[in-house]
Structure formats: C-alpha cells, structure tokens
Image (cartoon, rainbow, N blue to C red):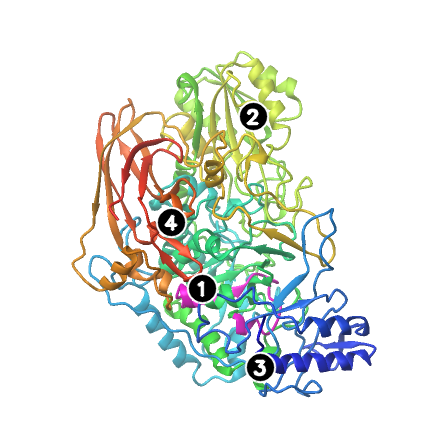
Amino acid sequence: MVVLSPRLSALCALLLTVCANAQSASTVTALSSSAPASVSSAVSASSTASELSSTVSSVSASSFATSETSVASITSSLSSVASESFSTLSSFSSAVSGSTAASSSLPASASSTDIASLSTLSSAASASTGPPLESTQITLPISSYGFTSFPVPSASPIPGVFPSTAPKSPPPPGSSLIPDFGPAWARAHSRARQQISGWSLEQKVSVATGVGWMGGRCVGNIAPVADWPGLCLEDSPLGVRFTDFVTAFPAGITTASTWRRDLFRARGLAMGREFKGKGVHVALGPMMNMGRIAQGGRNWEGFGADPFLTGEAAYETVLGLQNGGVQACAKHYINNEQEHFRTQESSNVDDRTEHEIYLHPFMRSVQAGVASVMCSYNLVNDTYACQNDRTLNQLLKDEIGFQGYVMSDWGAHHSTLAAVAGLDMSMPGDITFSSHTSWYGANLTAYVENGTIAESRVDDMAERIIAAYYLLEQDQNYPEVSFNAFDMTDPATNAHVDVQADHYKVVREIGSAGAVLLKNVAGALPLKTPRSIAVIGNDSGPSTRGPNGYSDRGGDDGTLAMGWGSGTTQFPYLVTPLEAIQARAQQDAPGTQVSWWLSNWDTAGAAATAFQQDVALVFVNADSGEDYITVDGNEGDRKNLTLWINADPLIEAVASANPNTVVVVHSVGPAIIEPWIENPNVTAVIWASLPGQESGNAIVDVLWGDVNPSGRLPYTIAKSPADYGAQLITGGTGDEILRIDYTEGLNIDYRHFDSNNIEPRFEFGFGLSYTTFSYSGLHVSTIPQADRTSAALEAAWASGKAAPAAAGGSTALWLHRPAFKVTFQVRNTGHVAGTEIAQLYVHFPAGAGEPPSVLRGFEDVQDVRPGESRTVSITLSRYDLSVWDAEAQGWKKPAGKFEFSVGTSSRDFRLKGTIPV
C-alpha cells in the first residue's frame, strides 16, 4: 500500500481535474517555447482520459533509493511517478505556480512545452513474439521544487597519503597517492559564485543552455555572458574532431590493451594539450561504458569489459587531459551499452550491479577531479538518464560527491524539469537539432518565474559550470577557438593551428604496447630477416578514398585504425602496414622481396601470392561505430561477431598455401576466430585493435621484435557468440521502448565465463611475449597508518558493518587509502628483454555473492632483462574488498576468508595467498 503525501494528493487532484477537462475537449494543446501561442501538437485526449484517471492513482516506488533522500535532492516527497498507457498522448503542456494546491485549470503562466510530467510512452507490453518492451516510463511530477545545495565532502590532507593538489599538478601515473582536489574545487566555486552574483536570471540560464546545433564553431557552444567568454565543447575521446593538424590517437580499447597507467596518462596529456591548443574548453571524453555487449557499437571508444581496468584507464586519462588544460567529460552516464534503439531503451539494473560495475569508472573519474559528466541517451530503470534523480542527484552528486556539472548527450534532454533531477547543461541546446526551441532557455526562465523550479537551483547550475572553468584556470591566457567544426574549409574561421607536436611518438608506443600476441608457434615471431614476404588483405593497405574519405570514418576500406561515429577525428596521415612493412624489410635486408594482394574476395589470387613466400602476413578487421551511420548493414552495433570482408575464407586460403601464415587483426572488440585459429599453418596471431595514425609503424615494431609484445586482452574472446552472458537486443518500432534487463548482474565478460565454467578461446587479461616470466616470493602485509583520522569507521568496516550513507561516502578517504600490500618477485626466464603485466584477482568469501575472480590490481613490470628479477608491489584498499549493500546503502566487508591470486591473466594464476582481514 502506498500512502500519498499531501503534495502527491494535490498532484493527483490536479491531474484528475485535467482528465475531466480533457474528456470534454477535442484536443490537448502543447505550446511551443519559441511561439507561446502556437500549437506544436494536438492529439485526441478523450480516448486517453479514463486511462489517465486510472494511471495517476498508481504511484511507482521503484525509483526510490532505500536510503534517505538527500536534502539536496528533490524537495518534493515524491521523486517519481509512473505514467502508463499514454500511447496516444504526444505531450502534455503545463507548469505549476508556486502553490502545490490542486487547481481546476492550468495557470496562465504555463507557456512552455514540457513532457517532464506526462511523457510519450510505448504501446502496451510486447506480444509473445518480438523484443521485450516497456509499458511504463517514470518521470518527475509537476510540482513546486525547492533546492538546497549538496553538502561538500571534506577531509583534512594527510601527507604522503592524501595531498591537496590541482589539475595542473596531479600525482605521477600509478601513484598510491590519493589526490585531494577539494581545496581547488572550493576556490573555483568561490570564484564562480562571485562571477554570477550580479547576473540576471536570463544570464544564468544561458550558461546552462547551449546555443543550438550549428549555432557556433564547436559541436557544443555556451554563449558568452558579460565578461565571461563562454565555452567550446568538442569531440572526441581519441582526438579533436572536425579540424585539421591534430593527432589521431589510438582508440580507448587499444590504450586499455597496454594495461599501462603511464601510457593512459601520456595519451590523456597529449590530447589535453591539443584540445587546449585548438581553443576547446571541454573535451568530450573519456568514454567509459563497460562493453557489456560484445557487439556493442561504441565499445572501442572505451576501455574494455572490466570495471577496475576501465576505472584505472579513466582515472589516468582524466588526470592527463586536465593536466593539459582542458576540462574532461566522463561519458556516457550510465548503462548506455548498445547503439540499437539507444534513445528508446530502458537499461534495468539492480542497485548492487550499478555500483560495483557501471558506476565505478565514473567514481574514479570524480576522484581524478573530472570537470563534467555527460548523461546518456537511454533510460535507466524506466527513467531517462538525463532526468534521473537517482543516478544524477543521489548517486553522482551526493554519494560520490561530484562537484562539477552534468551535460546532456546531444539530444538526450527530454524536459525542463530535468533541472530538478540534476541536469546542469543542455546540449546542444535545442530540443531537436536546429529547431530553435529549448527545454532550458526561455522555458527554464519561465519555470523559475512561476515557482516550479527554484532560482537557487539555476544558481547551482551556473556555479557548477563556471567553477569547472576556473578549476582548469581557463581564465588565464586561454587560446581562442581556431577552427570551425561545421565548415573546415572556411578561410575566415579556420586558422589551421598545428597542435600535433611530437605526439606521434605516443601513438606509435601505444600501438605497439597495445598489440596482443595470441599465438606464436615455434617462435614464428619475431620475424628473422625473411627474404620474401607476402602481405595479404584489404586491411593492410590504403583506402581508395584516403584515410578521411568516409564521413566520420563510416566505411571499412583499407586498414582499420579507428571505428566510426562522433568518437573519431581526422587523420593527419595514416601509415598503412603495407608501406611500413616495405620500409622495414628494406632496412632489415636490402633486396627483400615484398609482394601483396589486397583483395579479400579473390582468395585464389591471395593464395597464389602467398605461395612459397617465407612468411605470409594476413591483415583482417572488424568494424563498428555509432548508430547514425550504417555500414554494410551494421547499424552501429555489429550484426554478428565474425571478422569482416570475407576474412575467414581469406585466412584459410592463404594458410592452405603457406605454412607460415601470420594473422594480424584490427578489431573494435572480440571476434569469433574458430574457423582458423587451430590451423597449424597459422603460426602466429596478433590482436592489434585500433592503433591510430601510426598503425603500420606500430605493428612493424612488434613483427620484427623491436618491441616485445606486452599487450593483454581487455575482454574475453569466446568460442561462440552464445557463450557471452549478455546479448544484443534488437527489434522495436515507432515509439516503443525496449526493455533491457541486466539479469547477468555482476557476471559480465570473464566473470560470466568463470561463474558458468565456460572455456573461452582467449581469456580476459591474456597475452603472450617473446620471452617468459616466473613468479615467486609472495608476501602480504597490512599497511600501518600513523594517523587515526577514521579509526572508528575502519573498525566498523572490519567488523562487517556497512559504511554509513553520507555525502561523498563512496569516495571517502578511509575507504580508498591503501590498507594491504602484496609483494612478489617477477623474473625474466627467457632470452630477450620484455615487459610483464602482473595481475591480481581477489576471490571473495563464498557467501559474498561475487564472481569467482575479480580483478583488483595490476602492474606493468617494464623492460626486464633476461635473468633479471624485479620486486612488484600491489596495494589493496578497503573498497577493493567491499561489496555494495543495497539495503544499508553502503560498502561492506563480507564475512569470511579473502583469498587472491597473482598471475598473467584471469585464468593463469602463478601465486595464491590470503588477505589478513
């Protein structure tokens, strides 16, 4: 039974009155913000009136958190209401004056378009055939909302543990120091409050409202206000989009494959400097979705399928970007795990899974001082992510203590009342591209003036946005925008500023360090001065259109170095494997014969080219991207997990002709390689991912042994697509909302394989080397603490009590500071120097409900000489040994014995121990 609060009772009375009025009316009119008297939609209301009457009497409590509602969250006692059976109601225009009393008619001040309260919904539940559909969408009720600022998490600096710092002076990569950005944020917020103190309501609203699609020179633009210059927001996670003389960096998935924090940071720093050099204030990255679906179109923009690895990559990337001077934007928040129907799907996730898997990388970004977060297109538990009080206010701003601002993804803003739910900035600012209407702008101003939204909330929005500007010190000699994202050839708006510096070196190093050696029979690699080389496959050579011939890289022709969509940039050049191989072969032995065959479909010609050559190098790929581009029937997400362009028959044909066939795969993610992986003539396989502009040089470094491969898989390669625990949901038509239930819970990727005893082809964390390593000398110790700052909290945690719910509770110092130290020896037992990636997996107590093995640490042990031993240390925090208690709303140490393993992958364990907790 649900007991209605006085405010909800008033709301229901209001809606029932509207129903009565609607029954006698022929239409319900929605008013346009750009023309208050115009009709933007008119639909029959009489057919929905009785459904509306029955709907408003039913309140959904599914979006309530089990913890107390934050004082900074919605002040209404109702945080959401289920609006059902509105398949024919396109919009409902209303705004309520300051009074919460029921009214027999809408107030005269209601002159804005808003579907925040009653939304367009899908038809009833899906039939027995077809995709699962949602019949409910939870939205904010029409009411009058006050606002109280979120408490600011505070903790005293601790030398050697928790030093006060700023974005321009982060701790070194991989440091155990936990940076305290609190003082820097405090100074930035103070300056922002002073900046906006004399501004009008309209000026403050304009800071939160983009100027509209193509309304400025960047993909997103905030107009200047008084002496504040506004903001330029620009893609992408791998480089500055829509301009020239910039670097095309390796994709996130390639970077993650290095498992090297120093390279995560170096890439972020180089990108940050390029964004700043072009005059961009906000870089729209990094991307940190989890790769839940192996076919997911944008997985390649992120850092793999494990929250810990993704979190470390996100953390270091944010530190690097912001050290370079640009604001970073953590995206896409949250559960945006497939492209199909991304704006019309509800990702239904339980609270524990949300915290332990999908929220973790964003938490690590907040710990890195990230300036902004981008909310995603999808719904989360039946509420759109950009107007979701639970995810934006309660989790992000309260529990994690985020002090920056939340922007919408482009077109992901659905209502003016999203401001109440935590959305600070509307991007690109218009309701639909170039519509010249906005949910914010005049609508938000009207909502404040009629008492629906408190002006103090608008102050908070503007303060957060401008505080991020001051946090990055962008008021100090920041470059002007020097390009035009919508017209790259316009001489008046493109200064062609070259920001590349020597960043090609970072690109090449990541490309080689991220190459994963999956197979190497009898030392086939590195190559040993072959006299004849056959280079096979379309992926080895140039595109017939050049590297930028397809808009946003939406085509698979020639070597693949990035996926497609908004996560791309222009290549300044692209070194193909074919040209790099020819150059390296002549350097190695002048006169070496190099022949090639670039057609994947003429397999007979490929086999003839490979016949009697010392080695045949076959290059193949698999591509994907964003859903606004379809390539060969792949609507962003991949249709399947096969390699593209006849790759499997091509490899088999070449292997039948040449007993030393080496396969190089450039792929956006995992692929099924069963047709040929066990072929004895396939002597070596390198998984090269998406290497960026230095692609050919990077792979040549590995093929010839100039670089000993140390890359490790950031996901699992299965034997069958059905082996993955979550599958792509397709189907849906019109305004239907797909239901995507995350029934696998914590068991994504390797966790699913381990929990269900499924044998993968290559497990998460796997990768070979040209040398071998041994592990020994395991030791575990408790890290002593000189201070007693949080002794009571630490003792309560040790006794099994959940951490108290508090502002910034999930990022509290006592929870994240190093508490245990694991040390061991790694020795190079081979004949060449190499880098080892040591990985630590925790095995939680049996009753904890965790997967069998959970990654909780890794270290790259670089350039270990033959016979040399290195001591390696990995620390664990209390957070690393905690699970989320959804009932208590806190992190908790489960009862029982904690064991762990150290090894070379998620299944190859070399050392085992017990953690003394």
Counting from the top left corner in percent of width and height, residue 820 is at 24, 48
User: Which stretch did the figure color magenta?
Assistant: 395-421
Quickly name the residue at label 4: 312
Which is nearer the N-term, disc 1 or disc 2?
1
Tell me if 475 is positioned left or right of 827 in this view: right
Residue 590 numbered mark, or none: none
Crowding at dot 1, Cα within 10 Å, few <14 / some 14-19 / many 20+, comes out as many
* Of the pair 741 and 427, the residue shown nearer to us: 741
Identified by mark 1, the residue type is: Leu
| Count of numbered circles on the image | 4
How far apart are the two marked residues, 4 and 1, measured between alpha carbons? 18 Å
In the picture of the structure, the residue carrying the numbered disc 1 is 396
Residues at marks 1 and 2, CA–CA distance in whole angstroms: 42 Å
Residue at 52% across / 31% down in the picture? 665
Give above or below for 179 relative to 722. Answer: below
Write down the residue under mark 3.
Answer: 7
Q: Amino acid at mark 3?
A: Arg
In the drawing, what numbered circle is on residue 674? 2
Q: Measured along the vertical axis of the image, is residue 83 above or below residue 176? A: below
- Placement of the N terminus among the 4 image quadrants: bottom right
Three-letter code for the amino acid on which mark 4 is drawn: Glu
